[in-house]
Amino acid sequence: MSVLVALPKGGVRAFCKGASEIILRMCDKVVDYNGESVNLSEEQEKDIADVINGFASGALRTLCLALKDVDDTSIENSIPDSGYTLIS
């Protein structure tokens, strides 16, 4: 599920939530412990995938939440499918 939200000072932010393994593939950044957006390393991606798979092996489903600021307002009604920042 995705939504585009108009920001108070202009611009648009896309939020996306869904199956963890799918959302994770859409992300190239992650929010760190300081709340900053940093590049998602291959090692971090593997660690996150291992956690997802650990829950799945116990018959548990997980969800991920990600965001992306959309700079190009000409695609205001188009939901991006890559370049997200993983929140949780």
Image: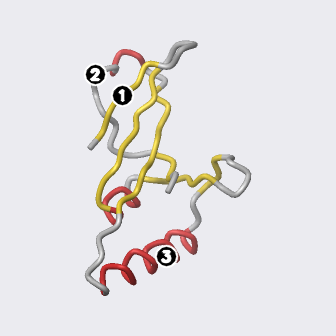
Q: Amino acid at mark 3?
A: Lys
Within 10 Å of the Cα at label 2, are there few (<14), some (14-19), or many (20+) other Cα atoms?
A: few
User: Farthest residue toward the right?
Assistant: 34
Q: Amino acid at mark 1?
A: Leu
Q: Position of residue 14 (x, y in %)?
A: 40, 33
Mark 2 in CB contact with mark 1 (< 8 angstroms) = yes
Q: Position of residue 64 (x, y in %)?
A: 40, 57
Q: Position of residue 20 (x, y in %)?
A: 35, 63
Which of the marked residues, 3 or 1, is nearer the chain's N terminus?
1
Q: Circle 3 sits on which residue?
A: 46
Q: Residue at x 29, y 70 (%)?
A: 61
> Which mark's residue is nearer the viewer, 3 or 1?
1
Q: Residue at x 30, y 86 (%)?
A: 57
Secondary-structure class at tag 1: strand
Which of the marked residues, 3 or 2, is nearer the chain's N terminus?
3
Q: Circle 1 sits on which residue?
A: 4
Within 10 Å of the Cα at label 1, are there few (<14), some (14-19), or many (20+) other Cα atoms?
A: some
Q: Circle 2 sits on which residue?
A: 77
